[in-house]
Amino acid sequence: MNIPANLKYTENDEWLLLEGDTVTIGITDYAQDHLSDVVYVEYPVSAGDKVVKGDSITTIESVKAAAEINSSVNGEVVSVNEALTKSTGDVNSDPYGSWMVKIKISDPADVSTLMDAAGYEKYCAERSH
Amino acid sequence: MTEPTIYELSSKGRPGVTYPEPDVPLAKLPEGLVRKDLPFPELSECDVVRHFTRLSSLNYSIDSGFYPLGSCTMKYNPKINEEAARLPGFAHIHPLQPIETVQGALALMYELQLWLAEISGFEQVSLQPAAGAHGEFVGVSIIRAYHLSRGDSKRNRMIIPDSAHGTNPASSSMNGFEVVPVATDANGNVDIESLKSVCDDNLAGLMLTNPNTLGLFDQNVMEVLRIVHEAGGLVYGDGANLNALLGIAKPGMLGFDVMHFNLHKTFSTPHGGGGPGSGPVAVGKHLVDFLPGPIVTILEEGNEEVPPLFGFEMPKQSIGRVKAFWGHFGVMVRAYTYISMHGPDGLRKVSEFAVLNANYIMSKLKGTYRVPYNRVCMHEFVAEGKWEDAPDVRALDIAKRLMDYDFHPPTNYFPLIVHEALMIEPTETENKQTMDAFCDAMLKIAEEAHKDPELLRSAPHNTPVGRLDEVKAAKDLVLCCWIPENE
Amino acid sequence: MFIPHSEQETREMLGSIGVKSIEDLFRDVPKAYRFPAIHIPPALSEMEAISNLQSLAEVNETTRDLVCFLGAGAYNHYTPAAVDAIIRRGEFLTAYTPYQPEISQGTLQAIFEYQTLISRLTGMDASNASHYDGATATAEAGVLAYHQFRGKRTKFLVSCAVNPQYRETLRTYMAGICNICVTGDESDHDPLEDWKYLLSQIDTNTALVVVQYPDFFGRVYDYTELAEVVHENGAMLAIVANPMALGLLKAPGEFDADIVVGDGQPLGLPLSFGGPYLGFFATKNEYVRKLAGRLVGETVDHNGKRGYVLTLTAREQHIRREKATSNICSNQGLMALAATVYMSLLGKNGFKQVSELCYHKAHYAAEKISKVKGYSVCSGKDFFNEFVVSCPSDVEEINHHLLDHNILGGYNLSNDYKKLGHHMLIAVTEMNTKDEIDALCEILEEVNHD
């Protein structure tokens, strides 16, 4: 299970990369493994939309499951990865290289309070199925 | 050999079924609203019959073999049902005819309402819902309407066990409820402590399938009902598993407030490749006014000489119409026929043997397939389709390999709480030889899983098509036939 | 009775399980509630049962005994014999939902062909595998529109000329969602006014506008202008269509409808006292992923052979659970098959022919009735096979009189429209002969003289 050290993680298997005041969001290796082949990615938001924690920012569908990314930060959408909707398989082959949404955040604390790589690894291990 | 589509078989200028020339003068056609071209194929009757006959040969069906699909109750569909539904007096009556001209149909519906209520121990039945999920939507709507009628608008949470069929939470959401899951304990019962912790003033009710999707009768069912009722909630019974309870227990007597039936499961009406079904709903006295309508009622009592006059009425505080007309009458006729041929003793035998059959198969398989709940099961049971020492093999592979042995696989991956679940429901109409052959196949496959797993992973081999590329189907979405250029 | 076990086999099975009797298997059922009596009549043999059913059936007067001019959402069309021959085949009739595609290619390909025919008929990009009926399909259009706008638009405009039962069903489905307003069909409105009255009510809070084609009164309109205004406001347009009319008339897709729904009962399904029928739902490509219900897609197997499979299943309840937009599980598989066989049998020319027969016979009937003293046709210029007749007396009484002459009169519109007292909705199909229509007019004339 690949868990890059430089990212932050949520309990919903999203990764976040904070650069300056912009956070880039995608889903983790664990998530793509559980979804299996992703066939569809859709964004209910676009550049300029304001989002608050809990707002749906991405819908992902695979053959056997569907998942939504709900924002874990408050801010404004900078951009969404349109190219990803044409090559959804990248989410499986390269989850950390397949970003979905970039958000300019109002409060960096929103990100720093999330799990780090070690915390996420522990979280994944503890989940029993 | 691929069967061509109707468009590929089409041939320009080929006549199909013909109709007489108009016997009236031709009227002027509406300007600007006439269709220029109708892109339908052109086939002869022989073409059509051959095409669909060949297609039918690609299907597995109850009429061809064993179909142990858990939760679906794939029992034998009696042919007499088809005769009954096709009687001209049933097939050729318009739903809006004056009621005086359809008293036979209304009498049948009225009696079916009574029978279903009696079988399940409830006060009143509505035959309106078109399928099980439709009945669930109705049941949950009734619960919502009930609370609102008592001025209780804060009850917005519905408890649903984690073993429930997906239609349960979906029906709750459609009604604006928040879904609150409750766990199943190690014995396969609703976890009582977990249940107590979510019962509060905001509780609308609990949706409970009993026996549940693990095929287990909840050993604490009375306690579960009591806890929910004390918190002011109502209990909805998902009747999909009623095949275990006919003459064995009546959900209404146990204390359920509302339930739905699946006529296409318990009462032998055919599945038709995905419908039509029929999902009548039964309620206790306190909920009678909320039923969806119209329902059949007696408008004028009869006496020795004159039969009663049947008609329709809308319950006083009905949740409203949930479809057009009166429900799936054609399906009701089939269920009515079935019940009339079984009577009380026959119905009880149905459940006794459904449960006997399931336990028999379980007794033969549980040494080889892990059955997570070591208890007597009801009409179905769940086994795990995996082994520690055969890590490459999953339930899906076992299912596909079963097809090579000429059996339809059991239900896969449901309920969600058992990993690599295989849900097996033989039903009462299977004989011992068939079940023994099925068990032999399952045991052989278990052996193959350890000795030659590739056989399973590449299965099926003997079917019209092999494993299909579902990723491609979703990504390169093609939902219509390719149509030749020059049409 | 269909239980095959002998006593010997039963004993062997009990032995294998390890219990003495079948009753032992029910110990988990609380004792006080175990084995209750069921008070229904004792079992009948097959012979007795069918005789009993025959008696019940014979009480009813059928459209074989009566000449039918009744429509209003269910129509008396002719079903070629081959339809029933196909759907009675056990391989179709007793098959389950095609979740295991390798052994369900018959069902899957048939549904795929059904989807294609419905898409072509309605002029839309895609169709699902069916809903329960036209009413629930209309309700699902409402649900789709609601989710399309994520609940931000709360107005649902419905023409009063949409089938009353469909409008009621839509309201029942939307009742579970807060703040929704279904409007446009208020009872104080003149029901025979045309659809243009809706235009002023369309705004940026409108999620969906629903009209019918032909409408409940049989009238036919070009909805292009309506679609333009709807889309200008960012809303969606759903058209409820009678599939039989589409053999002759322009497809609703050409008006730029977003959704086309309706009931496929006219496509070879028996009247059967109201069900089971066939809800169809067709839409544009951009809404396909929001579609409720099953969808069959084309693909290949690992040998490259063409095959069909249920697809986009991630939308459905068994995966999405509480996040599913609809709880639909069963569809109307066998009815969709029947409709597919019907449309295949008639084909491009036969289907157009039946549609035209309905049209011309209905227009002949309207022409003749309008000449009977006391009656007038008030449907307006263009109609398909149904029209509204203003009658000299109560419709109930007139129908009573017609019944004495073995004629099933039209629908009493005052049942649903307060302002249409003494108005009857007459339907004419390819099954009605010129003689029958002439006889109808004679009897109607008689009634007026009473």
Image (tube, grey):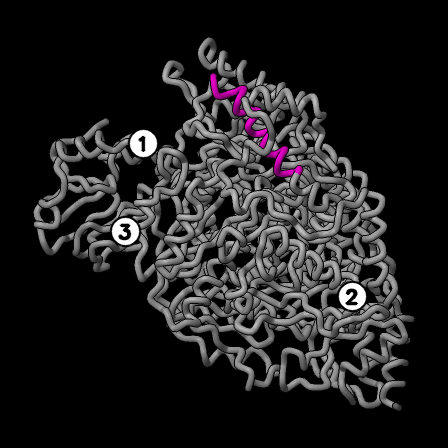
Based on the displayed image, in which of its 4 quarters is residue A126 positioned? Answer: top left
The amino acid on which the numbered mark 3 sits, given as a three-letter code, is Ile
Pointer 1 chain: A
Closer to the camera, B7 or C260?
C260
Judge by depth and name the residue closer to the eye, C329 or C213.
C329
In front here: C280 or B307? Answer: B307
Q: Which mark is residue A129?
A: 1
Q: What is the distance, in whole Å, between disc 2 and disc 3 at their CAs?
A: 57 Å
Side of B142 where A11 appears, left or right: left
Callout 3: residue from which chain?
A
Residue for badge 3 = A57
Give the letter of the chain under mark 2. Answer: B
Q: Position of residue C147 (x, y in %)?
A: 40, 59
The stretch in magenta equals B349-367
Secondary structure beneath dot 1 equals loop
Considering every residue shown, the one lying at the far top of the view is B451
Q: Residues within 10 Å of mark 1 (few under 14, many from 20)?
A: few
Q: Earlier in the sequence, mark 3 or mark 1?
A: 3
Q: Are marks 3 and 1 in contact (CB under 8 Å)?
A: no
Residue lying at 56% horizontally and 45% vertically, measured from the top left: B249
Q: Residues within 10 Å of mark 3 (few under 14, many from 20)?
A: many
Q: Is residue A75 above or below residue C225?
A: above
Question: Disc 2 residue type?
Answer: Gln
Observer-side mark, 2 or 3, equals: 2
Rendering coords of residue B459 (x, y %): 53, 20
* Residue A65 seen in the current view: yes
Q: Which mark is residue B194?
A: none
Q: Residue at x 67, y 42 (%)?
A: B347
Q: Which residue is mark 2?
A: B103
